[in-house]
Each structure stands twice: as structure tokens, then as C-alpha cells.
Amino acid sequence: MFTILESRDLAPSIRYLRVAAPKIARRRKAGQFVIVRVDGDGERIPLTIADSDSTEGWIALVVQGVGKTTKAINLLEAGDSLSDVAGPLGMPSRIDEVGTAVVIGGGVGTAIAYPTAVALKEAGNHVISIIGAQTGAQIVLESEMEVACDEVYVTTDDGSVGYHGFVTGKLSELIDEGRQLDLVIAIGPIPMMKAVAEVTRPCAIDTIVSLNPIMVDGTGMCGGCRVVVGDETKFACVDGPEFDAHQVDFDLLERRNRAYATFEHQRDSDMQAAIDLQSAS
Amino acid sequence: MNELTKRERMAMSRSEMPARPADERNSDFGEVNLGFTAGLAVLEAQRCLMCRRPVCIEGCPVGVQITEFIDLVAAGDFGEAAKVIKRDNSLPAICGRVCPQEDQCEGACVLAKKGKPIAIGALERFVADFEREHDLMHAEPTAIRTGKSVAIVGSGPAGLACATDLAKLGHDVTVFEALHELGGVLSYGIPEFRLPKEIVAAEVEQLELLGVRFVTNAVIGMMDTIDDLLDEEGFDAVFIGVGAGLPRFPNVPGENLIGVYSANEFLTRINLMKAYQVGSDTPIFDVTGKAVAVFGGGNTAMDAIRTSLRLGASTATLVYRRSREEMPARHEEVEHAEEEGVGFQMLTAPLAFLGDNDGFLTGMRLQAMQLGEPDESGRRRPVPVPGAVTTKDVDMVVIAIGNAPNPLLAKTAPDLEHTRWGTLLADATTGRTSKRGVFAGGDIVTGGATVILAMGAGRTAAASIDEFLRTDDWERSVQ
Ligand SMILES: Cc1cc2nc3c(=O)[nH]c(=O)nc-3n(C[C@H](O)[C@H](O)[C@H](O)COP(=O)(O)OP(=O)(O)OC[C@H]3O[C@@H](n4cnc5c(N)ncnc54)[C@H](O)[C@@H]3O)c2cc1C
Ligand code: SF4
Ligand code: FES
């Protein structure tokens, strides 16, 4: 059992949880994830470690309630627990001193990008972050990013806060201004990562994305998480989750992530009905 | 005990394992075999000739005292018989169900020539079930404590067997398992209908009674490394039994389409995550009324294809690139699969998988094969028949063509020597690796093999670990 030490909303349906997991906290590096099960019958889902403290022995997770399991996690409060947390898994982010690095986070992806931004800064880089969401209320970790990075740009699809448009719009602006960008790391929805890859491809800026395929074990045992990078099949849980954006087959990833769409839709609406019933009574 | 003459015994017919009717069992996950009744067991045991030189024992990888236990069964002393088996095999309820007896004890039995070897596997299973069901399993911690501690990485048969012996010798044993459930392939690979999970759980419980500690969700290499276990956690020795868990794919176009699974993924979703149960949170491709093909010829392939029938597939075809005789699966599984309605398409290999615009599998292109010259394994190598290519509709495919060792642990322990196939280098008679204090056994050393070989390797290593802990002498060889 892994006790939840703190649980609070960051934005509507996005929650920040601190979980007691001393061994994982001691080992984890930016870019790694854990596999979590809520309870004895639960599915195994991957969640990126957003932060940790090795002396206090906790890791932080930022969870967007989109499916049954993530919604269930987001109902948990401090003092509750998760039945299983395994990790840290995956390859850590490659943190080098490159000069200027742009860290792009879309939606809850900002939380995943945050530790990488911190590590890049510590490695001596000039770090620019671009954090985007549909609307201002969904922007997360803006103040943390302000502390960690040299420049922070907020973008919203509806223009309610910051730059009006997508993260790629802001990125293109920086490129057009003639800024020397040595590395771009983009973490967020697949269409966003794919769009970032297309923006940086013509000017050959090194670009890394963090992929989120469906996983089961997270240890390289099942191959469910396979993605195609270049012409090679890779297991994202052990070979990734971070890969060269210019080599990733995003269309395949997007299709494979829809494998269980019907099942998930049914399951999630059953879950919502149960929650509604509970709150009605 | 046995009053019958040799001639009378020879005249008796072999008792067959009672099984549920094929058309009933192929739509649920309940166990297929029902096991001997006490009456059948005694009858079968009486058939044993009690050979002066029991070749059956020579055929058993761990040397179970077969004649001694069968004699006790014939006398009706089932509890005592279980104790005899357990001297050499700590997991008889499991081995009785999954060992390839036809290649081992029963294959060696003198009566095999006449086609009716003693049903040693069924007797082993009966005796072990009797012991469990009559609550005769009473493990308790050994009184003597050596003060030494051993970390066991992986809770498959190799790790469990090693843990059992070390705990009985009075060492403190902690088993680290990456998954949330214990048992390795016994839990995530072999389905409920062949090995009920309550049996695996009962064995684990015995180990807990022996004082063994289990830590789940412990991915060694990522969480603690082998060095951490030895240096920081203070373990005096480490046993690595992490299995061969990296699925192989045939490397043909279309193998990443939705609906193409590795056997590991398919079986893990079913067995570990219980995706077959209504209301499970883990999804599985819906094959109701659909066509399924499984590629491979081993036990894994049989488990996958029989599982797909139970999920409601309308056709279930096993596709294998050699001929039926070469299939490495247990004979019983092949027979059961056939009875349940599995179709066999032999001498066929995949060329490509075909899909629709949404990335879902819709068909497969197959190449007919013929057997050519023998290869390194001594089996005749399948070679393509020129031009013999066909296309077939299919909705789900499971690839069960074998596993390679998972490199996860190796990557984080560079001082452990590996073979060029990625298996861990360990001495066969001692389980010693290239690193002081670290031992290994099971599929990680041999590549995918069998439960009993993994168990045997765990026990061999346990003896050698005990020797090392007592003498602190790494060079010395263990007999
Ligand atoms: C579907 C299937 C059916 C089979 N049927 C039969 C059969 O009928 N008869 C038979 O004799 N054999 C059968 N086998 C083969 C047999 O199961 C294996 O040979 C045997 O289980 C190997 O045992 P092991 O202990 O070496 O490894 P495993 O059983 O593979 O166990 C290894 C364990 O280590 C864990 N692990 C891996 N990496 C780490 C890590 N870094 N840290 C912590 N833990 C880790 C794994 O999660 C796993 O639980 C079958 C195999 C499969 C896949
Ligand atoms: S070889 Fe067969 S008949 Fe002879 S002792 Fe063994 S089981 Fe009995
Ligand atoms: S999640 Fe199973 S191999 Fe990656």
C-alpha cells in the first residue's frame, strides 16, 4: 500500500498527489514514470513522476481524470492509498548542456515536462518554457515553471490567457525571431507533439517527445507499448518514453491508443453513472 | 504392500485423467482436468512394476523418488506420499499439472513402450491436491537461524524453489517481484483452466509460513540495483530468477496493427489482469464471433489459442511453421486444444498482417513451408515452398514464437556476464554468476524452458548459496 500524503486540484479535473514511496523517490530521475494500480481489481496505468523528495520519501503525480482509473485516483484524499506503485520505470531524460532548451508542455503534459525543465536548468542551460492549454483555467504549474525557467510563455487556444493560439505558434515566433534554439522537448497530446515535430524539422532543431502508448507491465515484458521510431519497433516503457520526435510514427501511436476506445467509453460512462448515483443519494 | 503379480499389473489398463467435456469447458475458464479420485489413484499406483532400476526417476529432472511415493499411494497413504515428493519437488501440485511428463518420467517408464506408462503426473497431482485439500501442508519457520540473508529477484518457479530451500536452512529470505502478483509465468502466463491461481497462492502461502518475505512492485535494476541489495540493503547473497520475458515478434509488415498481440500481452491481460471477467478494468480485444490465429507450437501458443476460444472466437487456428510432430507443446495440451475445436494449420509461416484504415487487423498473408535439412536443434528446418502464398481473413492474432531474456536487469548490472543470446552466464552445477555472491537460474540462464527445470535450477543454486554463506568461499565448487 502506498499512502497518499497530499491531494489537491491544480485545475479542473487535474489533481496533484504526493505519494509515500521512499525507494522510488531515492532513485527516480526526470522523465521516468511509475505503474499504478488503485485497488485490488484495478488496471495498471503509467503515470510520469512530476516531482520527488528523497529525504521525505515521496513522489508527486499529476493526474488528469480522463478515464475510469484516473478519475478514481482523483477522488482520493490524503490518508487514502494506492494498492500498487512500481518504478521508477523508463529511461531518464537525457540532460545535457546544449545552450538554449525549449520545454513545451501541453495540458497536463506541463507537469510531466516540469522535472525535465528543472534538470535542464540545473545542467546550465538557458531554459524557455512554453505551456499551453485550451483555456486559462487549465494551465498548470505556471508559477513553478516561472521559478525554474529563464523565460515562460503561456498559450491558450481561446486566448483567455497569454498568447492566443497553439504552443507551436509561439515556438514558430521564437524561431522566426532568429533565436538560437538547441533543443526542444515537447510533452502533451499526440497532435501537439506531432505539430511541434513538424515546426522544428525544417530547421533541424533536436526535438524530443515523451510518448504515452497503452502499457501493461511497464518492464518490457508484453510489447503492448510498442512504437515505431525510424524504421525500428521500440518498447516505449524500456527504450523510452522519450524519443527523437523527427523519427516517431505519430499516426501509428494515435491509432494504437484508440485500440480500446469502445471498451473505455462504456466503462467510463458506467463509472460516471455510479458516481452520479452516489452524489445524488 | 502391493499384492498383485507382475502379470496382473501388466494386464491392467492405464487410468486416464478425467476431464470436463470439451464443449462445456471451452467456454469458461474453470479447470479442464478433474484429477484422479482416490480410487483411480490407488488403481493406477498398483499398476507400477516397482522396477529394480526405476528409469522413471532418471527421467525426472529433479529426481523425485517415484517408486517410493507410488508405493505409498498404492497403500492409500497419500499424506506420506506427498512428503516423499516434496523432498525433491517443492511444487508438486503445479508440476503435476504442467510438466511435460511424456518427455520426462512417463517417457522413460518401461511401460511407455507398450503405450501405457504409469500416469505419474496425474498421481503427483492427486497426492499434492490431497495434501492441500486435507490441510496437511504445515510449513513453519526453521528453529535454527543462521543470521544470513538472501535476496531473491523474481518470484517464478526458480525463485520460489530457491526461497523454499534457503528458508528451510534457516536463512532470512526476501523475494522481490516486479509485478503486483507473485508466481511469474505461473500467474501471468499459464491460464486458470490449466493451473488454477489458488494453487499458486497456496504455495506462496506456505512460503510465507516458512518465514519468507515478499516484496511486490519491486523492479530490481530500476528501484534497487543488485549492488544496492548487496551493499546498502545488506543481503549476503542474491539469486536472480527473472525469467525470459521479452516477447519475440516475427518482424513482418503489419505486426503493429491493433489486434496483433504478443502472447505475453494477451495472456497477461487475461491471467494477471483478469480481462476475461465481466467488469474487469483491463480491456481485451473483443473476439466474440471472430476469427483468431495464433502463431507458434509451444505451450504458450496452446494457452493463447484455447483462451481465445473461451473468449468467444468463432474460429481458432493454430499456425505453426513446422509439422505437428515438432510442436514442443505438451501432448495433452495439443489433444485438449483439438477436442475443444482448435484448427491446426501446420507448415505455415506469416508473411504479413493486413489492416484497415483505422489500423485494425483484417487479414494475414501466409507462406506454406516444407521441411528441409535438420538445423542446430536437430529438427528439420522449415523452408518456404516457392509461390505458395495465401491470404486469409483474421480479426485477432497472437504471436507465440518464443521469448528472449529481458535486458532490463542486465543493463543495470554491467558486471554480470551474459551470453551473446542475452542469457545470464551461470554455472550449471552451482548457479554461480561472474559476480561474487550473485547466483542465477531458470529461464534467464537457459532461455525459455520448463517449470521443473527452473525449479531444479533454483534448488541447485540454493544448495550452493548455503555453502557460500557457511564458508564465505566463492571459488570452491559445490558438488
Ligand atoms: C504461457 C506459458 C505457458 C507455459 N507452459 C508451461 C508448461 O505447461 N509446462 C512447463 O514446464 N513450462 C511451461 N512454460 C514455461 C515455464 O513457465 C517457464 O520455463 C518457467 O516459468 C520459468 O521460471 P523462472 O522462475 O525462470 O521465470 P518466470 O516464471 O518467468 O518468473 C520470473 C519472474 O521474475 C520477475 N522479474 C523479471 N524481472 C524482474 C526484475 N528486474 N525485478 C524483479 N522481478 C523481476 C517477473 O515478473 C516474473 O514474475 C510456459 C510458459 C509460458 C509463457
Ligand atoms: S519405470 Fe514405470 S513401472 Fe517402472 S517404477 Fe517407474 S513408473 Fe513404475
Ligand atoms: S508495457 Fe509491456 S512491454 Fe512496455
Image (cartoon, coloured by chain):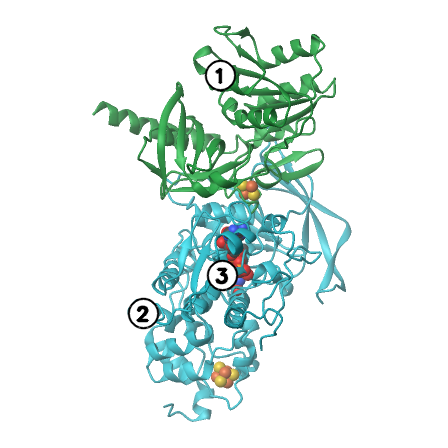
Q: Secondary structure at mark 2?
A: loop
Chain B colour is cyan
Q: Marks 2 and 1, how far apart in space?
A: 59 Å
Q: Which mark is residue B159?
A: 3
Chain of the residue on which disc 2 is drawn: B
Q: Secondary structure at mark 3?
A: helix
Cβ–Cβ below 8 Å for labels 3 and 2?
A: no
Amino acid tagged 2: His
Q: What residue would you read off at disc 1? A: A142
Q: Secondary structure at mark 1?
A: helix
Label 3 Cα crowd, 10 Å radius (few <14 / some 14-19 / many 20+): many
Q: What residue would you read off at disc 2? A: B138
The quarter in which the C terminus of chain A is drawn is top left
The answer to whether the residue bearing label 1 lies less than 8 angstroms from the nearest atom of ligand 3 is no
A187 left or right, relative to B323: left
Q: Are marks 3 and 2 on the same chain?
A: yes
Label 2 Cα crowd, 10 Å radius (few <14 / some 14-19 / many 20+): few
Q: Residue at x 43, y 61 (%)?
A: B173
Q: Nearer the viewer, residue B24 or B417?
A: B417
Q: Marks 3 and 2, how far apart in space?
A: 20 Å
Q: Nearer the viewer, mark 2 or mark 1?
A: 1
Percent across and percent down for residue B168 are 41, 70
B301 left or right, relative to A143: right
Q: Are marks 1 and 3 on the same chain?
A: no
The answer to whether the residue bearing label 3 lies less than 8 angstroms from the nearest atom of ligand 1 is yes
Chain A colour is green
The quarter in which the N terminus of chain A is drawn is top left
